[in-house]
Image (cartoon, rainbow, N blue to C red):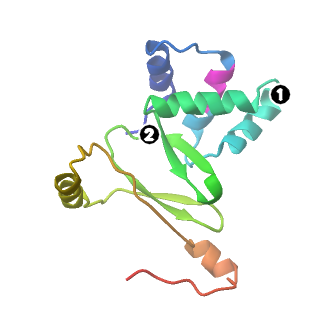
Amino acid sequence: MIYTENKVISRVRHKGYKLTPQRRKVISTIALSQEHLTPIAIYEKLQSQYPGIGLATVYRTLEILTDLGLVCMVHSEGNGKSYLLRRPTEHHHHLICSNCGTVIDFTNCSLHKLAQKLSQKTGFDINNHLLEFSGICPDCQASVKLPYPTKRMK
């Protein structure tokens, strides 16, 4: 299950944030996307329809949505970030292509025992984790001759 645009708007309003027309458009753009979007991609999608929207508005809205746990943020190489509406009941992680930026979600994660061991060893009360793998996706492997051989993890 993915949050819907209406559920996100309701939650943002409930938490006391103003729902300006610009924020609604950012939320709508993310809600309509099936893939992770960078702030620049969101801005460019909105710029043609709403030339008055600013990039700062996009960033501020994404920060609010992230703080409220409504979007999933992916760290790409070079400090880039991309966003997708969160699946509230589905814990997931990411495979990220370091060539084209494609993000693929995966759900099977067996880190529970590791988290328990780390908690016992360090005294941390671990309440969440984030796992991201980076590499080269099959499309990029097929279409681009890389200047270096890729190393596979074993």
Whether residue 24 is in magenta: the answer is yes
Task: Tell me the residue at 19%/57% (across/down).
Answer: 121
Residue at mark 1: 51
Q: Secondary structure at mark 1?
A: loop
Residue 92 located left or right of residue 141: left
In the rendered image, residue 74, in percent from the top left (x then y), is placed at 52, 50
In the rendered image, residue 100, in percent from the top left (x then y), is placed at 65, 64
Above or below, comparing residue 66 to residue 41 in the picture: above
Tell me which amino acid carries mark 2: Arg
Above or below, comparing residue 43 to residue 135 in the picture: above
Task: Tell me the residue at 55%/46% (across/down).
Answer: 34
Mark drawn on residue 86 = 2
Mark drawn on residue 98 = none
Q: Secondary structure at mark 2?
A: loop
What span is in magenta? Answer: 22-28
Quadrant of the frame with the C terminus: bottom left
Whether residue 26 is in magenta: the answer is yes
Residue 127, picture quadrant: top left
Look at the magenta stretch and give its main secondary structure. Answer: helix
Above or below, comparing residue 79 to residue 5 in the picture: below
Residue that sits furthest to the front in the current view: 122
In the rendered image, residue 112, in percent from the top left (x then y), is placed at 21, 56
